[in-house]
C-alpha cells in the first residue's frame, strides 16, 4: 500500500486518539459497566466504518493505490484480523487486571494508564509487525514457526491466571535503578517532585507493566494475524483499531468477567485453529471467509455456554 493510504490511516487514527484523550479522558473518572459497554460499541463501530475506507483503497478507487487484493478481499481480511486481535485482547485484560490490583491503582486512574499504554503498544507492535513481515517474506518456513508458537500459546492459556505475579518481575528493579520511584501516587501524574527532585510515580511503573504485558501477548497475536493476511497495511490497521478499543473493553469485560466463564476456553480453540492453519499454509488453502466464520463460531459458543451455565446456577440456587 502506498504512502497516501498510510497517511490517510494515520490522520484518521491520530484524530481519534486526540478525541479520545480530549473528550473521553478529560477527567479521571471511574467507568461504569454501562458506560464501558457504550464506548466499546462506539470503537467497534469506528473500526467497522474504517472497512469502507479499506474497500475504496484496495478497489483502486483512491488515486495512486495499487494492490493485488480486491476491495472485498481486503475488507474480509481486515475484519477477520480485527475480530481475531480484538478477541485475543480479552486474555490480555486478565493480566492487566492483575497488574492494577498488584500496584493498587484506583479505578479512576486506570483509564489514563490504558490510554498511554495504547500509544506505547501501537509503536511496539509496529516494530514487531515489520519484523514479522520481513521474516515471512524472507523465509517460507516461518509459517511453521508461527504456527507452533500459536499452538503452544493456546496450551499456555489453559494455565491459571494467578500464575502471573508482577512482584517477581525484574521490571521494577530495573526501573528503580534507572530512575527514582516514589511509593505514593500523586493524582493521575506519571512523574512528580520529592524534596525538589524528579521521581516517577507508581502510575508510571504500572504503565511500563501494561506495555510489557502487551508485548508478551503480541508474540501470540502478531503471528495469528499473519495467518489471515500478509499485507502489512491490513495487519497494522486491524491491530491498531483492536487496541484502540482495549480501554473501554477492559472496563466492560472486567466487570462482566464472571458472566462469561467459558470465553477464555473459546480463545484457546481460536488460537489452536489459527495455529493449525499456519502449519497447513503451504499444503491446504483455507479461505479467510471460512476463518472468520470459525472465529465467530468459537466466540459465540463460549458466550452462549457461559450464559447457559449462569442460568443453570441461578435456577439451582434460586
Image (tube, helix red, strand yellow):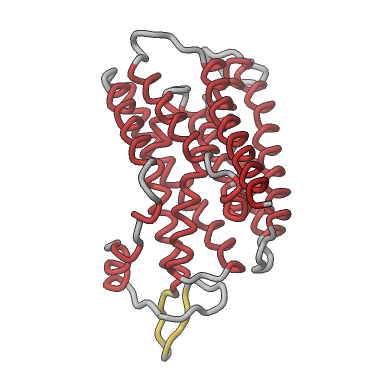
Residue 5: image x %, image y %? 58, 29
- Give left or right: position of 48 versus 169: right
Residue 43 seen: yes
For the residue pair 136 and 254, the one nearer the viewer reads as 254
Q: Nearer the viewer, residue 305 or 245?
A: 305
Q: Nearer the viewer, residue 208 or 277?
A: 277
* Residue nearer the viewer, 167 or 124: 167
Total marks placed: 0
Residue at the image position 56 percent from the left and 16 percent from the top: 289
* Quadrant in which residue 210 is drawn: bottom left
Q: Is residue 64 visible in the rendered structure shown here?
A: no
Compared with 260, 191 (above or below) is below
Name, please, the residue furthest toward the bottom.
Answer: 195
Going by the image, does 158 lie left or right of 303? left
Q: Residue at x 57, y 25 (%)?
A: 297
Task: Give x and y (percent) for residue 195.
Answer: 41, 91
Residue 135 x %, y %: 30, 27
Q: Residue at x 27, y 66 (%)?
A: 174
Position of residue 304 relative to residue 255, above or below, is above
Q: Is residue 42 above or below residue 130?
A: below
Amino acid at each position: 500500500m502506498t504512502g497516501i493510504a498510510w497517511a490517510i490511516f494515520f490522520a484518521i487514527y491520530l484524530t481519534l486518539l486526540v478525541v479520545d484523550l480530549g473528550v473521553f479522558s478529560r477527567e479521571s473518572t471511574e467507568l461504569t459497566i454501562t458506560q464501558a459497554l457504550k464506548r466499546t460499541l462506539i470503537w467497534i463501530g469506528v473500526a467497522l466504518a474504517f472497512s469502507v475506507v479499506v474497500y475504496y483503497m484496495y478497489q483502486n478507487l483512491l488515486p495512486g493505490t495499487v494492490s493485488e487484493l480486491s476491495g472485498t478481499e481486503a475488507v474480509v481480511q481486515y475484519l477477520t484480523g480485527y475480530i481475531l486481535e480484538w478477541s485475543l485482547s480479552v486474555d490480555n485484560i486478565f493480566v492487566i487486571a492483575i497488574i492494577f490490583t498488584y500496584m493498587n491503582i484506583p479505578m479512576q486512574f486506570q483509564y489514563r494508564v490504558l490510554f498511554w499504554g495504547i500509544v506505547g503498544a501501537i509503536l511496539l507492535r509496529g516494530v514487531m509487525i515489520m519484523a514479522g513481515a520481513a521474516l515471512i517474506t524472507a523465509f517460507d518456513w516461518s509459517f511453521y514457526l508461527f504456527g507452533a508458537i500459536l499452538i503452544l500459546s493456546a496450551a499456555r492459556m489453559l494455565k491459571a491466571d494467578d500464575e502471573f505475579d508482577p512482584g517477581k518481575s525484574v521490571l521494577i528493579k530495573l526501573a528503580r535503578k534507572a530512575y527514582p520511584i516514589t511509593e505514593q501516587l500523586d493524582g493521575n501524574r506519571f512523574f512528580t517532585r520529592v524534596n525538589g527532585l524528579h521521581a516517577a510515580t507508581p502510575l508510571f511503573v504500572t504503565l511500563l507493566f501494561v506495555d510489557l504485558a502487551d508485548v508478551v501477548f503480541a508474540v501470540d497475536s502478531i503471528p495469528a494475524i499473519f495467518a489471515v493476511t500478509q499485507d502489512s497495511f491490513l495487519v497494522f490497521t486491524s491491530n491498531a483499531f483492536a487496541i484502540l478499543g482495549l480501554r473501554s473493553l477492559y472496563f466492560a469485560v472486567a466487570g462482566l468477567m464472571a458472566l462469561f466463564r467459558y470465553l477464555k476456553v473459546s480463545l484457546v480453540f481460536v488460537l489452536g485453529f489459527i495455529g493449525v492453519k499456519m502449519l497447513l499454509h503451504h499444503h491446504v488453502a483455507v479461505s479467510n471467509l471460512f476463518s472468520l466464520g470459525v472465529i465467530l463460531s468459537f466466540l459465540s459458543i463460549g458466550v452462549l455456554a457461559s450464559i447457559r451455565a449462569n442460568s443453570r446456577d441461578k435456577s439451582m440456587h434460586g
